[in-house]
Amino acid sequence: MRLEQQLILKKYYETFLMEHETHPPLQVLGEAYLNEQKNENSDGSNIRFAQGEFYYHHQDFESAIFKWEKVSNELAPWAQKNIADANVELNQLSVAEKVYTSITTDNKTLLTEIALQLLSLYIEQNNFDSAFVVIKEAVSLNPDYPNVTTIARSFYEEQQDFDSAVELAVNELIRTESIQWFEVLKEYIDKGFTKAIAPDYFNEVLVTLHNVDQVQFTQIVSSLWHSYKNEQTYLLWLTTINELFLHIEIHSSEIWDEISSLYEETYFELIQGQYMLRELHEIVPNLLTNWLKIVNPSHSVIPSAAVFAWDEIFPSNIDSANIKHAENLLSYSINHVNGIDYSLDLFESITMWAQKHDLEMGHRFRWLVDELADLRTNRLLITGTSGNGKASFINSILGENILENSISNVVVFKNDVETEINAITDSTIKTIENFSDYHNLMPLNRQTYRDRACVEFKLPCRFLNENKLTFVVTPSFNRNNDTRDETFDYLNTADELLFILNADSPFTDKERDILLSIQDHTPNLQVHFILNKVDNIYSEAEVKRVIHDTQARINTYFPYAKVFTYSSLYTNSQQVNDLTEFIHFNFNHKNIDAERTEKLLYFIRKTITHLLDKRVEMEKTMVDSINWNEDMLVKLNGFIHNLSDFEKEKIQLITESYRTMKKEISNDLIEHIPKLLQSCSDLISEESDFGHIDIELNTAMNERVQEYLEQTVLPNLAQSMQNWITTSNNEFLQSKLFLEEISEGLNYLCGEDRIQLEGDFKVLDDWRRDTDRITTRIQIEEVNILHRFTPTQLLLKSAGKLFGVLPKNKTLVYNKYKQYLENEDYTDVTASIMYQFFLQFELFENALERDINLFFRNSFVELEQAVENTHIEIQEKQDTLQNMRSNPEVYNDSITLFELRLRQCEIFLNIGEDNSYTDLTLETNIE
């Protein structure tokens, strides 16, 4: 056993027992110590060190420490380490730590052992910060020391410190190049422990793996790729891996297929519109370069097409050598791209993007794309000029009189179990309930459905079913050619064209010109002819001549076109069978998938063009909307101002009317109450008790006033109040008309019933209730009429008491009282009575303005809410417009990427059977 191993295991003492195996160890060591003492040049350190080990193994830790403390030679550092170990056993952890950390040595083994002991000590103390420090130092100092890295990995995992665990795995994999650490690192990556680590951190380990084992390299790359996906560092990862692949040598092998698939998947993810072009310009060129570098040549169509498309959309972005490399790879390619699936995926992406940005794509486009995606039937477009019997031909095939002689809409006939009719426009898909409604739809003027209308007619039809056909019937070409654009649009939805000719004048110059235009528009569309109305020709010989001449003239311009003679009047099974054979023989498709894909791409390109136009239209609409709302804001504030003035006018009118009524009543009271009180003189006679006459008169006068108010004034006042309420009601009815005029004006400006202003007529109900309450009965407190401290009243009261008991003086007192009552003006008394009488009416009057405000309150609230909503809408649209103008790339980048994807699919189609690609321009037939 090596010396270091003995020191680690504390078995150095066994070296002294080798010659004395039969003697007790303690005796042997003791004798050795005595012998050592006889040596003048020895201090006995070795023997003491060995004795300490023996005591330690027999758990006599204090004796062991005592011996080790006396060691002073080269074993002293190990003795110190052993002293610390003994203190650990004695649970003197703080002492042990102090001893461990005080040891000074250059021995890596000893230092590693100390670090491992300290690790255990710190874990025991829950001092994990120090534990991390010592284990990192141990790994850094002596990674090859047995179990050091294993212990470190276990510790990191137990502490859930996977950053340190990953760092350990990376460093050890670079250092040892062992499969063990490869598996550990891959496990960490697959479990997601590396997601937060910067991708370039793995550069060195990837280079190492590439040099050592390329299979392991591809596995780690794949794991890292998947771990960074959907993370914020994903683009940084792509930059990192692209840079790495640019500088490593790749030899053709199937081991790269998985990485090639990752490049393909990533490329298509990047061009979905999730990222800005400025980000992609930094990544995609290198990505395409590396994809070409590792792709299996037999599967090179997609990356090559991607390179060609990217170079067309972003010229000079890709090195010419890579473009040449892509062209060379095509000669080895054997794979096939499903153009229809790719096209449909692209269209779906565009649709979802348009919905996200509130852009209307129209139902018609989606419907047409769905139709083209259905490969179960051939789409036969049937057209011709006016008067050629197209409708009668279709009706004879369908077995029903569905089409009239003139149709204004495209009609698509499809076989189905049940009859169903749908009118498809850009804005909606509307189901038509029956034939009657269908026939009513057909003559509608072009303003209703414009030229974007299409009628889908599903019905049970044996001919369509057996021949797997869909008829696309367009309006006839007439003199004005107003159906040209619509018919030409639908040419791109058809697999073949059947042009109806009239046997009376077949293939006229006009028909020739129309067909030549169709050929320019869709050069790959097969064209054949139906020679209709042959029953109008008087002889069979003439029929043959007409057919021969017509075929000859047609073949001058359309060498491969055939003519089928047909009579709609004499339909029979043989004629239908012949037509079936004619269609099957002449309409053949070598590659229906490619043909349909090309048509799909036509509509996708039109969709992209439509969205580009929508972008301009959207900004203009936004500006117009802001301007309109600003104008509306001015009008709304004007309406509020006018309504406020109108409200003030009504408050003044209704309040003045009330005051006028009250004034009239007041004048009556001022006139009648004094007279009433003066008339109370008839209550006095010479027989009256003048000693108490003032009290009796005061009570009687108050009773007469109360009676007058209740029986005369209140009934008149109640009637006046009712008249006033009727007048107020008329004012409110005028207000209602005014509010309706405002509502109509605003709704006319808005183009919809957005505002409905109404007055609150409950105010009148409240007034009627209050009027009934205050005019039914009134009780005023007794007024002091004859108990005032005026000189006259004092004299009368005194005279009545002094002289009223003497008969001869009663006449005098009587006359004085009567004269006083009849001549007093009672102004103050009347005012006091009126004050009490009108108290409730004053309260009512004071609430009039508030009540009239209540009548108009809801209207003001609604107008003010409309103002607030308009402000909000203006701000929202201004923010949107500002964002559109300041960040045009949000819109334009997506459109550009759609064009890129479209161009790729066009290139798929444009690659010839020999897998060559030289023409980078695919004809898309967009006018």
Image (spheres, rainbow, N blue to C red):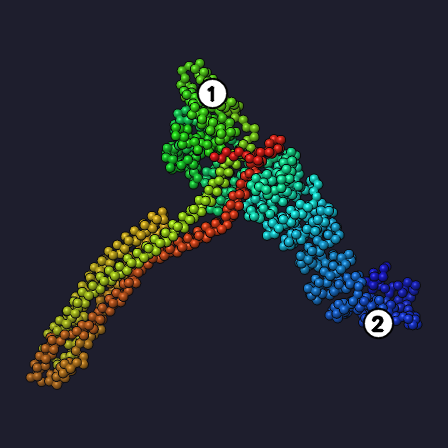
Label 1, label 2: how far apart the Cα atoms are: 126 Å
Q: Can residue 216 be seen?
A: no
Query: Residue at the location (45% across, 47% down)?
Result: 619
Any part of residue 277 in sight = yes
Assign a secondary structure to mark 2: loop
Mark 1 Cα within 10 Å, few/some/many (few <14, many 20+)? some
* Residue 70 numbered tag: 2
Q: What residue is rendered at 37% in x and 35% in y?
A: 445
Nearest the eye: 77 or 16: 77
The spot of residue 15 in percent (x, y) is 88, 63
Label total for image = 2
Query: Secondary structure beneath disc 1?
Result: helix
Q: Which residue is mark 1?
A: 553
Point out the image quarter for the N terminus.
bottom right
Residue 10 spot, x, y in % from top left:
83, 64
Q: Position of residue 500 (x, y in %)?
A: 44, 25
State whether residue 191 is above or below residue 779. above
Residue at the spot 59% in from the left edge and 38% down from the top edge: 308
Q: Position of residue 364 (x, y in %)?
A: 46, 38
Q: Earlier in the sequence, mark 1 or mark 2?
A: 2
